[in-house]
Image: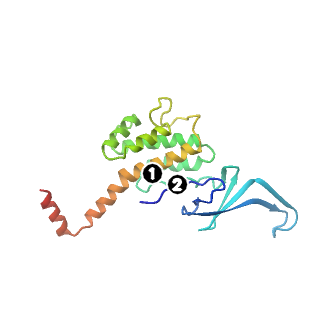
Amino acid sequence: MKGKYIAPSLEADAFNCVNCHVYTKQHWYYMQGSTQPDGFGGQKQDERFMVSYCEHCGFPTIWHGESIIFPLNMSAEPPNQDLPEEIVEDYEEARAIVNLSPRGAAALLRLAIQKLCAHLGQPGKNINSDIKALVAAGLPPKVQEALDSVRVIGNEAVHPGTIDLKDNRDTANQLFRLVNFIAQKMLTEPREIDEIYNGLPADKLRGIEERDK
């Protein structure tokens, strides 16, 4: 299982790079310009803008205050590779807009969670009841608490695909993590267990089948 994703934040010593996705040290600089391409001539520095450089790959991330303005679509963790294509599309659209519209991204991610519940065999009509059923099927109970904390369930005013005026970047970041966490527990881990089991020698598999009879 991959390590915890640490989202980029202003002047943080380290986070997951928006380019290589490696968790590594970041080097910070105020943005400064010159009238000459060689760096000489008139000088201008604007403290509203900063640049962080990834120590691993050297990629620059440009910040205006606490918002990333370059690149716009790479500051959230990538989607779990086992998510269905339809859900990946919602997830990637949320990644593309999260810096410009965290509320819009959160709405898309709630919709993605609803679709993921349906993909996992639930009705897909009520996230609260769907998650409760998934917990009974093996999803950690703490997921219910996490969903409550970001107003995905337990709040009748917030529905999948709708805008909540209280949503912010932190809410969106938690929802990205929740989509991937549910996928990890309910899709990736069962697939990996099946791969381990099916990779056993044929005689071992026959012995297990005989034992289970």
Element at label 2: loop
Q: Residues within 10 Å of mark 2 (few under 14, many from 20)?
A: many
**Residue 112 relative to residue 173: left or right:** left
Of the pair 17 and 15, the residue shown nearer to us:
15
To which residue does mark 2 refer?
A: 77
What amino acid is at disc 1?
A: Asn
Of the pair 49 and 94, the residue shown nearer to us:
49
Element at label 1: helix
**Residue 202 relative to residue 13: left or right:** left
Q: Position of residue 174 (x, y in %)?
A: 51, 46
What amino acid is at disc 2?
A: Glu
Mark 1 touches mark 2? (CB < 8 Å): yes
Of the 4 image quadrants, the one containing the N terminus is bottom left
Q: Residue at x 37, y 41 (%)?
A: 118
Q: Position of residue 175 (x, y in %)?
A: 50, 45
Residue 165 tag number:
none
Q: Position of residue 5 (x, y in %)?
A: 51, 56
Q: Residue at x 45, y 60 (%)?
A: 2
Q: Quadrant of residue 199?
A: bottom left
Q: Position of residue 77 (x, y in %)?
A: 52, 54
Of the 4 image quadrants, the one containing the C terminus is bottom left
Residue 180 tag number:
1
Q: Is residue 141 above or below residue 37?
A: above
Q: Residue at x 58, y 35 (%)?
A: 166
Q: How many marks?
A: 2
Q: Is residue 210 above or below residue 173?
A: below
